[in-house]
Amino acid sequence: MPSLNPYLSFRTNARDAMTFYQGVFGGDLDISTFGQFEGMVDDPSESDLVMHAQLTTPEGFVLMGADTPGRMEYRAPAGISVSVSGDDEAALDRYWNGLADGGTIVMPFDTPPWGGRFGMLTDRFGIDWMIALNAAQG
């Protein structure tokens, strides 16, 4: 079965970001660097940059990311948000609080007109997030 997974781009701080996300969401983090693969490094100072990182959480989320070497154009993510939603209020509160640490709250995690809870923030790495607690069905 196919899956849709966010793949985040960073200039040089993918390791820090992905480790941060592991602290927020838990799970297993696998990181490969450019230096691990022959012919992937033009500049030896970029050997430790992340070529691919994958975080797989206990809930089944898969979040991927990588650094962008100097030889490639880097554009900060824009026009897209990573959205996490569900019915587990305690888990969503934990995610919100973790992602908000060092970030900027755009819209507080509060009750919107449609019920439940919803909030938007930009984390310390410049990634936009939306967190939504589903409205109770009644």
Image (cartoon, grey):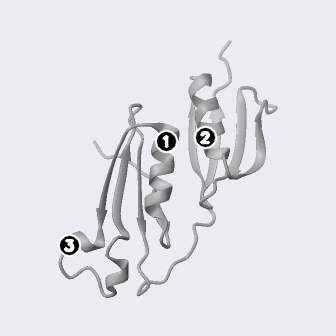
Residue type for callout 3? Phe
Q: Can you say whether 138 is above or below 35 in the image?
A: above
Q: Is residue 35 left or right of residue 118?
A: left
Q: Amino acid at mark 2?
A: Gly
Q: Residue at x 31, y 84 (%)?
A: 44
Residue for badge 2:
98
Give me the C-alpha separation between circle 3 and circle 2: 33 Å
Residue drawn at 35 percent across, 52 percent down? 54
Q: Residues within 10 Å of mark 1 (few under 14, many from 20)?
A: few
- Note whether 33 is above or below 96 in the view shown: below
Which residue is identified by label 1? 23
Q: Residue furthest top?
A: 138
- The answer for how far apart the CA atoms under marks 3 and 1 are is 27 Å
Would you name the residue on which mark 3 appears?
37
* Mark 1: amino acid: Gly
Which sits in the foreground, 91 or 136? 91
Quadrant of image for the N terminus: top left
Picture quadrant where residue 78 is located: bottom right
Mark 2 residue element: helix
Circle 3 Cα neighbour tier, 10 Å, few/some/many (<14 / 14–19 / ≥20): few
Cα distance in 3D space between marks 1 and 2: 8 Å
On the image, the x and y values in percent for residue 15 come to: 43, 60
Quarter occupied by the C terminus: top right
